Amino acid sequence: MTRHVVFPALLLTFFYTAACQGYGAIKSADLRCEYLTNPLGIDASNPRLSWILGSSERGEIQTAYQILVASDRKNLDKNSGDLWDSGKVSSDQSTLVPYAGKPLKSGMACFWKIRAWDKNGIPSPYSMPAFWSMGLLLPSDWHAQWISKIQKPTDPPKKGETAKPGPPAPYFRKTFDTGKKSVRRAMLYISARGMFEAHINGKRVGKDMLAPEYTDYSKRIQYRAYDITGMLRPGKNAIGAIVGDGWYSGYIGGIMIRNYYGVQNGLLAELRLELSDGSEQTVATDASWKCSLGPILDSDMLLGETYDARKEIPGWDGPAFDDSVWENASVMDKTDAPLVAQHAEPVQVVKELRPVKMTEPKPGEFVFDMGQNFAGWARLKVMGPSGTTVTMRFAEMLNPDGSLYTANLRRARSIDRYTLRGGGQEMYEPHFTFHGFRYVEITGYPGKPALDALTGCVITSTTPQIGTFDCSNPMVNKLVSNILWGQMSNFISIPTDCPQRDERQGWMGDAQIFIRTATYNADAAAFITKWMQDVADEQTPQGAFTDTCPFIKGLGGDGAPGWGDAGIIVPWTFYQVYGDKKIIGDHYRSMARWMDYLQGGNPNYLRKNLLNNNYGDWLSIKANTPKDLLATAYWAYDARLMSRMARVIDNDSDAARYEDLFRKIRAAFQKEYLSPEGRIRGETQTGYLLALYMDLLPEELRVKAAQYLVEDIRSKGWHLSTGFIGVRHLAPVLTRMGYPDVAYRLLNNDTFPSWGYSIKQGATTIWERWDGWTEDKGFQDPGMNSFNHYSLGSVGEWLYSSVAGIDLDPEKPGFKHIIIRPVPGGGLTYARARYQSIHGLIQSSWTKSLNQLSLLQKSRLFDTALLLSFGHPSPGGGRNRLLSNDFPCPPTGEKRLRDRGLLLKNSFSF
Ligand code: RAM
């Protein structure tokens, strides 16, 4: 019996939109180097180049390409690749082609373009030119010395005092003269122990915030490169920088101590000038730089910032400023940690929000509602007498009396204070802090503020948004928006758990369950590549991945099941989404060490040891999934993925060895946790989900296990009970096992616990806990109650892959081969998604009217075979028609789909 809607008539309509109307041949665009558009400061010796192809023709294919890389634009315009001319290369590869020209040197500018040959062997015109520049590749390339303004470290907080901010932020400056010569090219390479804000001739350099961002500074420190040619002039110029504490020396999440990586902040800057006469000039930090203190009295990531505008130093960053009373900077020790270029999108302000409402719960306390929970800060607009201090406090939620609810921020004080200079309108934004909030309380404001006294400044790592999804159910659309805001708020240099309380760390479990959703929403390739380096950096000598990366002692520990396993799951997922083998090669050794670590402690193939913090199915609802069961399932999954990854890098013996390990763990799992009837110990949704998703059951018991899973959901009044770990697999497994109706039921729920429940309570982001706030109990324990955690938002991947139906084929990763397989249901009358994959744009949408279902599929991909099917089991066909031998991996290849009666149309290529 099937309860699925049966559509008497099925109408399939296909359209193809040309990416570039008017061209007969294919055309390439969107050129990227190491996943980034025109990046500056690349320190890979063979950067990898990608492009996207388009054509007005159907069934097109790239049969060959040619890449030209030139040392200047004029050469490139003359079609001369003086650095590299690949010649015509017969290949359909259009992503991640490694540069293979002359050796690249520090600071070099590289201009490039490509052309591609179509299926008839006709070349396209060359693409528009793109660009990258090299960073400073060797330690000896740096002339700059680390400098500091030595300040007495602030005393640790006294007993009873929660936290005490650090010292004021130092200002550094240096003038330099280019004589009469104009500047042909000027590159600034800059980093900080702490955070920097760079200035040239009175203007801020770039828009990056919190630079040089978060790494384990004892292992590596990033630098950034800026082209500042346009900011310089012939003659006298000035460079300046402000340095704040940041993660380096400010309070750090979770443990709430200062100076974790170092006590003295420092600046490292090197300006390389090429002048009109061909000569070169370098301006680099050294003891001749001047420094002073200014208006930033303290600025801490967790505590907030105190700014006294009366202490501003007008013109401090300009050439005319008299710095004779400034002291000389001190040269600091070098660091042991290497300097590396930041190959990921910087954190920037990406949106401004206007408050939607202002209330005054108590006289003089004005509470602004920004209408959205997010990470960032508020820009203050104010006019009043000099010396007036305006205080801004931040919160995610309100108390019933309309005042701020801040208990859940724990020790993150999150207060910005601004003291007016007086004499006109003033604007203020903090420099080296951010908050997670929706509401801002202002006190001390001179008079009653207007609604536009505050503007919300939204920050995130600027990973481009490449996915959109919407459907006919507004609640689901709100869920999608909440997931996206959760991602923006928590992709801040690293994937964090939350942006508001005194934590904000790179929790591995959260990252691994959300990564597939994250990569639908945004192009997170560069971001994840960088974070995987953090993961590798923190691996212990025993081979353990850690719970958080970067790792800080006192928060988390050696990786718990589901957390440490991120070290395996993230590279695998990354490879699937981007088709990038390098991530596997780069991390293979550390992944193998993790596998050795697990096996060393668990000779019986049950993961009962080395469970470390053993979080289990974190924050599940009245369901106790046995923790060793969860751990063993993850270990088996690791082994399966290792086997697949070994195959990808042609290590067949390891592939066999890990597959064998997988089988042994699976056998042990079945013996220990599985009853002959297919019941799984603990009888929780998560237990069934893991066993099904991770392929731990004998074929004949899968159907039963799925039935028990559904029974459990039904027995809870059609509610989920999953925590962080289980929730990711809930809708995908139900769908694959032939219960998309149950998945939709959970999606549409708005009673507790469900995604809809939080939305009914006004959530604008994903909550950490299903019961963050309930009608019965009000707020959960403030000890751990974030309203902006993306983990439970991992259902996003199912919305893209099953509701709209855009999925990858793991056998041809990187969306080189795509699967369009929507699963209509849940009362939706339409659903649609757009996804800009690394190979190009994919769109899928369907609409359902009374008797008709139409599928509109558009793609700008080509050389991409398309598998098309509706994911419903055919009526009467029984639920197990959807089963596949190698589940959990999505169906691979049209044959299997055809065998299962799911393929409505043969595979075809554009
Ligand atoms: C919490 C974090 C995170 C979770 C760990 C186990 O404190 O917020 O989300 O992964 O604990």
Image: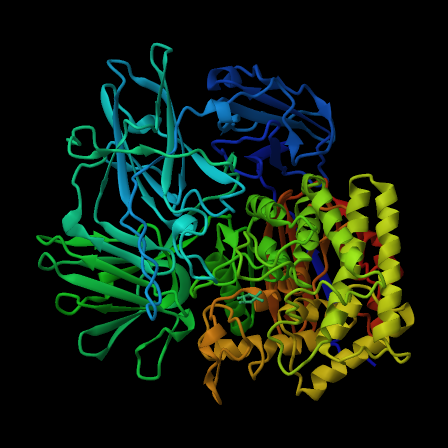
Quadrant (top left, top right, bottom left, bottom right) of the N terminus: bottom right
Tell me how many marks there are.
0
Q: Is 817 placed above or below 124 here? A: below
Residue 701 spot, x, y in % from top left = 88, 74
Q: Left of 646 or right of it: where is 544?
A: left
Quarter where residue 650 is shown? top right
Which is nearer the eye, 286 or 907?
A: 286
Seen from the viewer's position, the closer of residues 470 and 21 is 470
Percent x, y of residue 727? 65, 70
Q: Residue at x 66, y 31 (%)?
A: 97
Q: Position of residue 136 (x, y in %)?
A: 49, 27
What residue sits 71% from the left and 37% below the top?
60
On the rendered structure, is 266 left or right of 181?
right
Residue nearest the viewer, comparing 750 with 331:
331
- Above or below: residue 441 compared with residue 529: below
Question: Quadrant location of residue 439?
Answer: bottom left
Position of residue 279 relative to residue 225, above or below, is: above
Q: Can residue 869 be seen in this snapshot? A: no
Which quadrant is the C terminus positioned in?
top right
For residue 287, above or below residue 436? above
The image quadrant that residue 235 belongs to is top left
Residue 395 position within the rendered picture, expressed as x and y whole percent measured from the top left: 36, 70
Furthest residue toward top: 277
Q: Quadrant of ligand 1?
A: bottom right
Q: Is residue 749 left or right of residue 677?
A: left
